[in-house]
Image (cartoon, helix red, strand yellow):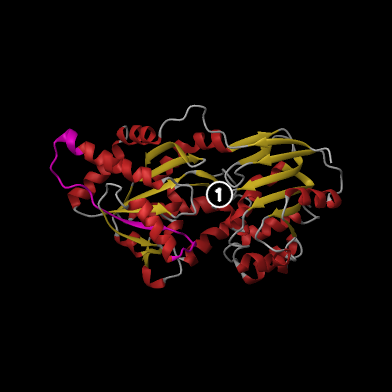
Amino acid sequence: MNITWNTISPAPPAKVKAVETVLDETLSTSGNLAEFLELSATADEPVLLIVNDPHRSTQTRPVLVAIAKHQAGAAVRTGSHRRAARFRAIVATGTHGFSIQESHEFEQAMFAGCGLNVENVTWHDATDADSLADVAGVRMHRWVADSRFLLPIGSVEPHYFAGLTGPHKTVTIGCMSIEDIERNHAGAMSPASEILRLEGNPVHDDTVEILHRLEATGKIVCAIGEVVCGGVLLAAAVGDPIGVLVELFPTVRRIYVRTILEPVDVLRLRVPLPLGRNLYQADKALKNNHLAVRDGGGIILEADCGEGIGPDDFMNLLRGSSDYALAQQIVARRGYRLGDHKAVKLRYLTDPAHRGVHVALVTPHVAESEVTGTGIRVFREVASALDWLSTVVAAPFATGMTIEDAGMITVTPTRT
């Protein structure tokens, strides 16, 4: 096989400022945070820190340290003897679950010695009815419902059906009940739920509506958004959650959005941890970059998958539907379940009546028997996957592209 390979990676700026400098400049030039902290201190009400879980790329600890430094500096400059803001924190897990040990290690790494008065920490459990309360028309963690001052911290990245992820999702989706998350994610079945699309995207629109309803109950939301690449915080913004999103969007585009002239014959999508922990999460790389491969071409998805293949509902829908039309019929008949959008769109990708793309998963941890009937083949090495693709791809292939950190970056052709 004579394949001409190109490689595309996220593109951080050539000159990168120190994380401390980025955060100091951001916080010192924004009056939003100072006013927010002063209001909470005056009211003697704790600020609820809402932080992302360990599966996200958010650089939370440096932000907490910077907030503490900013708060101390403001007190010195003004000569104020007013008490400093106090905090409690919730880890916004969405539907993710963690062991006691994982939770303890994360809490120690995030909060111990950060300089803030964090009185206590809890973890959201979307399935725990006792920890949920009605607020803004949805069921959310009781601490969100009970708190007036909300400070979500989240990284802004391309999201294949919400448009962008960020602190607007941390404070909403990250803290909602499983039923409300499922209702929100049902919007991902719509063609308008596209990567980088906000306007008219039903998933994004619903998230914004929940935010507005939260604020209408008297809650004050001050968000801190980041752009992170390769574990390095490159940019930050403070303020209204949607305003933060809009401010950081151009930076996200520069770093994570790439275009090519036309689709290639073979895509090699590399998905590092933590996103590559299972097939269900690594599938985001397929959703981000599927347009970069031609119809009838091949995709090699490289992921560790140490946690296996993912939720049963996702895999059962794939196994129970041999093509895209049947997958749609099943969902229409029984109603949407969390993760259905992933399976349905994957069937569209592999269905010969639509895209007809062949997908190979390269992983040391998943057996072929685990993906039988899903339209995916498993290999231990890239070379073996390429050999298989050479036998199933109808037309000879000559162009290939490797996409690094493919669960974050999105590559689209300008000509199809």
Residue shown at 48% from the left, 43% from the top: 156
Q: Is residue 103 left or right of residue 303?
A: left
| In the image, residue 94 lies in the stretch drawn in magenta | yes
The quarter of the rendered structure image containing the C terminus is: top right
* Residue at the far top in the pictured view: 15
Q: Is residue 394 visible?
A: yes
Who is closer to the viewer here, 5 or 416? Answer: 5
Q: Position of residue 56 (x, y in %)?
A: 48, 51
Q: Is residue 240 visible?
A: no
Q: Looking at the picture, does residue 330 appear above or below residue 64?
A: below
Residue shown at 31% from the left, 52% from the top: 112
Q: Position of residue 357 (x, y in %)?
A: 77, 51
Q: Which residue type carries mark 1? A: Asn
Residue shown at 48% from the left, 42% from the top: 231
- Displayed quadrant of residue 29: top left
- Displayed quadrant of residue 80: top left
| In the image, residue 322 lies in the stretch drawn in magenta | no
Residue shown at 70% from the left, 55% from the top: 361
Q: Position of residue 70 (x, y in %)?
A: 27, 38
Q: Which residue is mark 1?
A: 201
Who is closer to the viewer here, 201 or 179? Answer: 179
Q: Is residue 188 left or right of residue 241?
A: right
> Which element is circle 1 on?
loop
Residue stretch in magenta:
75-99
Q: Position of residue 386 (x, y in %)?
A: 78, 48
- Displayed quadrant of residue 145: bottom left
Who is closer to the viewer here, 166 or 191? Answer: 166
The quarter of the rendered structure image containing the N terminus is: top right
